[in-house]
Image: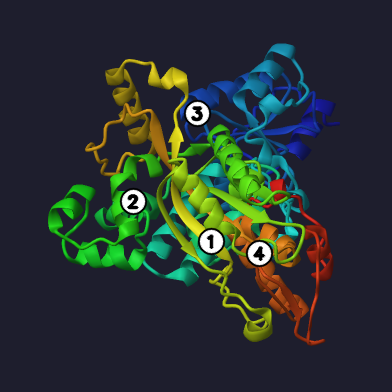
Amino acid sequence: MVPLKRRKLGSSHTGNAGTNSGDEVKFPQVVLFLLERKMGASRRAFLSQLGRKKGFQVQELFSEIVTHVICENNSGEEVRTWLDSQASSRPGAHLLDISWYTESMRAGQPVEILDRHKLQQELQISEAEVIMFSVPSYACQRRTSLENHNTPLTEALSLLAENAELSEDDGRGVAFRRAAAVLKALPSPVTSMSQLKGLPCLGEHSLRVIKDILENGSSIEVESTKNSERYNALKVLTGIFGVGSKTAERWIRAGIHSLHQLQDSGQTLNRAQQAGLEHYDDINQPVTKAEADVIGEIVEKAVVSVLPGAQIVLTGGFRRGKLTGHDVDFLITHPEEGREVGLMSKVVSWLESKGFLLYQKTTRNSYLESKDGPGRPASNIDRFERCFSIFKLAKEKETRTKDPQEVTENRVSAETDQNPNSDKLMNKQTDTPWRAVRVDLVVSPISQFAFALLGWTGSKLFERELRRWAGHERSMSLSSHALFDNKKGRYLRASSEEEIFAHLGLEFILPSERNA
């Protein structure tokens, strides 16, 4: 009769060389395999022998009966790739760090598997759980807060989107923006490409960039773009107020890549561009929420002084909860239809008389519902009466009392950190008691105010997706002026953002959750 211990060994180790038949198997339900990669042959042999002496089944060759794979200094992705290359593997086999093995040796039995023992926890998740991310196709259906769990990925895609937009390849730019928006809406960080299966708006190009970053920590394409002379020249030149990508491209073809080269080139600049170049450093410095609030108090005083009862709302990123921005946007209306007519010129005159405006350009309201109808180009947000301005904002007192040299050094340092590739102008004293800030003022009739508020709150992609949803899913035309039902041939009125969402068949999303 075969002894009990020999019988167990025979049944457990069939077809596996290297098993010491003299060692008793105490834990038949546990079958171990030590991965030699990075562990080394001699250390693996020693640990295997130690395990068998303690009563563990330790296989020399990997097979489908293995329940625990023991690794040392291996990443989970590395081990998973190795497992996939094997002819057979047991589904759900534990991938464990060497620490579980050594603790089990000390205990003389298999210890409980804790999270710290598992090799990259995400690899232990079942396939059904891996595809945990599920988001709607349209950004206007998703709630996107400022809490972004995938910043490295979204920043990379946003940079490629910006480069495409600067090159006037809007289609590619939108594709990257949509991909970034999907990642912003995810509830946790992406750690594996398998988690992205089935998600909308992730094209092959975006997936290649994401894969590159997940596997290598960075994207060659993104780094190449970030360091390219053309991209940086476009960034610097379009950073001038009043300069678009077409003008910047023309200047680059003329050999102009920096602000100093532009100053020395003799190029003719319009009034907006002259002001933009003069106040370049200030305009490209982020505006804080505190500064926006101060400007808001001044604008409100101007508005109320010339039209009592008028209402003013801070819009844009600040309404979505952002703490900094590139400019400050205000939407102005009056609860009595028609009272807002002529308001802008009076507000601008008041601000100019008080010395608050360094530059301003006002455009009239050119939208007439009866003549223009519902069809609005997607790129043309609105045609309200607007004032594009550069505001002269007094600095905080404590800043002005500092040593001028210290202020200058701190200012230059902060600006360099913000954009190390930008070509700063040093021809304006940085110890002035004020700074220049971009401010847009928009006047809307109360009948269009809800649409204007929705349009001017953003984000830009969220608004684009709202218009796309309206057209593709509801056969409607949406703009910052109105909503038109193309099937019924009539306008749909709304006195609040909630009503607009209801007309569109969408669940209402708060401004703080529109950060697509």
Quick check: marks 1 and 4 in contact, CB under 8 Å? no
Quick check: marks 2 and 3 in contact, CB under 8 Å? no
Q: Nearer the viewer, mark 3 or mark 1?
A: 1
**Which is more toward the observer, 101 or 174?**
174
In this rendering, the count of numbered labels is 4
Q: Is mark 2 on a helix, strand or loop?
A: helix
Tell me the kind of residue under disc 3.
Met
Depicted 293 relative to depicted 492: above or below? above
Tell me the kind of residue under disc 4.
Pro
Q: Which of marks 2 and 1 is in front?
A: 1
Left or right: where does residue 278 sit relative to residue 516?
left
Which image quadrant for residue 481? bottom right
In x, y percent, where is residue 234?
Answer: 31, 57
Residue that appears at 62% across and 60% down? 443
Query: Which residue does the numbered mark 4 point to in the structure image?
Result: 200
Q: In which quarter of the image is the N terminus?
A: top right
Give the CA distance from mark 3 to mark 1: 69 Å
In x, y percent, where is residue 174?
Answer: 52, 66
Q: Earlier in the sequence, mark 2 or mark 3?
A: 3
Left or right: where does residue 381 sit relative to residue 258?
right
Q: Earlier in the sequence, mark 2 or mark 1?
A: 2
Quick check: marks 2 and 1 in contact, CB under 8 Å? no
Tell me the kind of residue under disc 2.
Gly
Give the CA distance from mark 2 to mark 3: 61 Å
Query: Which residue does the numbered mark 2 point to in the structure image?
Result: 276
Q: Which of marks 3 and 1 is nearer the N terminus?
A: 3
Query: Which residue does the numbered mark 1 point to in the structure image?
Result: 386
Q: Nearer the viewer, mark 1 or mark 4?
A: 1
Depicted 308 relative to depicted 68: above or below? below
Query: Which residue does the numbered mark 3 point to in the structure image?
Result: 39
**Which is more toward the observer, 209 or 482?**
482
Give the CA distance from mark 2 to mark 1: 18 Å
